[in-house]
Structure formats: C-alpha cells, structure tokens
C-alpha cells in the first residue's frame, strides 16, 4: 500500500513540494551494492543491491535536479557555518563490496560524482590475503575490496574511504572495550594504509546512541553517520547524521520520493497514526482529503528545479 501511495503522490507532484520544502537541507544517500547480476546476490538482503542501470538513472536524476557534493565538503561547511546551495545531496556506500570498484566507480567517475565508501577493515585485510570466505571464485557482489583496491580508488580524488568498524558488529551487543577497539583500530588502519586524514565513520546497521556518538567524536572521526532517514542542515550534530537508504525498489518516482524525503515524511506520519490507532489509508481517504489541501500549495516545477 505504501508503494502505491508514494507513486500516486509523486504522480501528483507532491515529491516536488517535499524537495522544495527541504531545499536548504542536505540529503545524504546510503547505497550498498551496485550489481550487474540479474538475480542479485542471495546471501544478504537483496534490497541492498541496486541494479547498475537503475543506479545510472539515479545519478542522471540527481545531476538534473540536485547539486552533488562530497561528505567532506558538507562537514567543512557545517564547521565553518557556511550555507550550501539549495538542493544539495551527498552520496555514500556502506560495506565496501568489490562491485563498488567494478560497477559503481566507473559510473561515478564518468559523471564526476564524489562519494564516500565506508569499509570494514577486517574484510580489506582478508581480501588482500585472498582468504575472505576462502574463495576467489565468488562474484563481485559477494567479495569485498582489498587495501590495494581502496588505495587505487582514492587516487582519483572523487572517492573517500571511511570506517565501518573492523568487523561490522552490532555495537550494542559487544563490550565497551570491544566497541573502543572496533572504532580505534579501524580508523588507525585506514589512516596508516591510505595516509588519510578527516576519516568519517558509519555505524554498523545504523545503530547509535549518544554515548556511541561521543565515542566517535573522542576517537577523532571527522563525523559519524546513521541510517535514520531524513535531511540534515548546518546545525545537525555531525556524529548523528541522517541518511536515506536506497534499495532496489527505489526506481523512477519512488527514487524521487526517497531523495526529496517524501518517503521519510510518510514514515513519520504512519508512525504517529499507528500510535493513535489510525492508518494512512483512512487519512488520505478522508473528506476533504488533506492531500488536496496540500496540493494547492505545491510550487510549480520551475520553482522546485535546482538552479
């Protein structure tokens, strides 16, 4: 039902209203794998793997309607209290799958799009040694980048490598000492291997607390990112930045809804309605429909297009 509702709202142009409303905020996108495999890798949540052609369409849409900047540029603007242009987006990737290098990176490089890849440092070492999962015959969707590959990626200056811990644990399920090791050793490994400064951190599974955020700050990370949806602004806490996770279902208008944060709005509304014993269906079927009142205020396409 939610997918149908989103498509209907976007067909009516509500995503343009959401984009305009959030125009002075920064939208950070979170991808995982970009695949050329028609069946996608079945060993993990298939929703995390976006098909190459769909990803290419995503980049085209973003460049038509948004300005894409690096995560470092956004963090620098926040620290300097410098406003960014309207309709600004940041692109990130979690986990460091090999298909970032073989599928995503060529598309990003061709379009001049910057990105940050959050890697699991234990997998880099295993890939370097040829020991990850004990096989070199796995597909690029299953394998992870190596230190050599991430070093080569960073050399084009459009890719920045961030930390996703050493082993990608649920940080809530391990001891304080283990959390400290996961944050510290992964940052140090990236700094030493890549001679990198200003390293960003992404919480495994997106889970974080105020205490974890403070640990990331104290460890010396540049910033830290969650997978809580929604936009960011110049006043956002740099150690609990929001990201909008992109799945294989985010195509066409559904991708536009995700980037505009219309999807996030509806999720928040749905949570509030559930708490009150109501539903989205009942809300939008009400007379007079709130959506009709909203559409009366939707700016024109010319008003909501970037630049």
Image (cartoon, grey):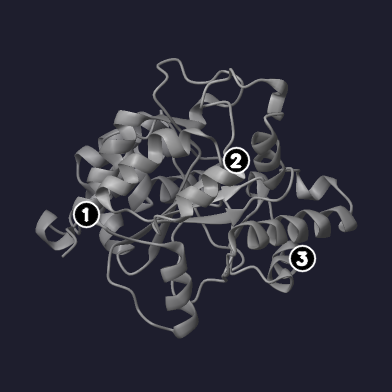
Q: Is residue 248 left or right of residue 86?
A: right
Q: Nearer the viewer, residue 11 or 49?
A: 49
Tell me if label 1 and label 2 are in contact, CB under 8 Å: no
Tell me if label 3 and label 2 are in contact, CB under 8 Å: no
Locate the C terminus and report the quarter of the image it occupies.
bottom left
Label 2 crowd (10 A; few <14 / some 14-19 / many >=20) = many
User: In this figure, which residue is indicated by the disc labeled 3?
Assistant: 211
Looking at the image, tell me whether mark 3 or mark 2 is earlier in sequence order. Answer: 2
Q: Which mark is residue 65?
A: 1
Asked if residue 232 is positioned above or below residue 207 in the image, the reply reads below
Q: Is residue 11 left or right of residue 34?
A: left
Residue at the image point whose x is 64% and y is 63% from the top: 191
Residue at the image point whose x is 67% and y is 47% from the top: 204
- Measured from the top left, where is residue 120 in percent x and y? 66, 45
Locate the N terminus and report the quarter of the image it occupies.
top left
User: In this figure, which residue is indicated by the disc labeled 2?
Assistant: 146
Residue at the image point whose x is 76% and y is 57% from the top: 185
Looking at the image, tell me whether mark 1 or mark 3 is earlier in sequence order. Answer: 1
The reply to whether residue 253 is in sight is no
The span from disc 3 to disc 2 (Cα, nearest Å) is 31 Å
Q: Nearer the viewer, residue 290 or 239?
A: 239
Q: Is residue 178 left or right of residue 32?
A: right
Looking at the image, tell me whether mark 1 or mark 2 is earlier in sequence order. Answer: 1
- Measured from the top left, where is residue 235 in percent x and y? 49, 76
Asked if residue 14 is positioned above or below residue 221 in the image, the reply reads above
The span from disc 1 to disc 2 (Cα, nearest Å) is 34 Å
The reply to whether residue 202 is in sight is yes
Label 3 crowd (10 A; few <14 / some 14-19 / many >=20) = few
């Amino acid at each position: 039902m939610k997918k149908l509702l989103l498509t209907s709202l976007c067909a009516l142009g509500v995503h343009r209203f959401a984009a305009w409303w959030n125009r002075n905020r920064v939208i950070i996108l979170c991808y995982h794998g970009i695949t050329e495999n028609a069946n996608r890798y079945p060993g993990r949540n298939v929703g995390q793997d976006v098909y190459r052609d769909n990803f290419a369409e995503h980049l085209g849409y973003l460049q038509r309607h948004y300005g894409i900047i690096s995560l470092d540029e956004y963090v620098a603007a926040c620290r300097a209290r410098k406003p960014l242009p309207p309709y600004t987006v940041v692109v990130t990737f979690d986990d460091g799958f090999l298909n970032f290098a073989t599928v995503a990176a060529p598309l990003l490089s061709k379009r001049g799009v910057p990105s940050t890849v959050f890697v699991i440092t234990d997998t880099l070492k295993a890939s370097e040694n040829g020991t990850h999962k004990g096989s070199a015959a796995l597909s690029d969707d299953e394998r992870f980048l190596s230190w050599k590959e991430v070093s080569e990626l960073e050399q084009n200056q459009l890719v920045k490598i961030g930390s996703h811990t050493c082993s990608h644990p649920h940080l809530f399920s391990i001891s304080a000492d283990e959390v400290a090791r996961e944050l510290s050793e992964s940052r140090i490994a990236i700094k030493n291997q890549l001679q990198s400064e200003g390293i960003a951190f992404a919480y495994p599974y997106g889970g974080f607390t105020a205490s974890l955020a403070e640990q990331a700050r104290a460890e010396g990370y540049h910033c830290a990112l969650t997978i809580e949806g929604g936009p960011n602004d110049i006043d956002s806490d740099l150690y609990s930045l929001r990201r909008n996770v992109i799945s294989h279902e985010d195509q066409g208008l559904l991708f536009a809804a995700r980037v505009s944060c219309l999807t996030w709005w509806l999720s928040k509304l749905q949570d509030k309605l559930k708490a009150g014993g109501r539903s989205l269906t009942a809300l939008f079927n009400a007379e007079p429909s709130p959506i009709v009142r909203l559409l009366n205020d939707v700016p024109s396409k010319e008003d909501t297009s970037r630049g």
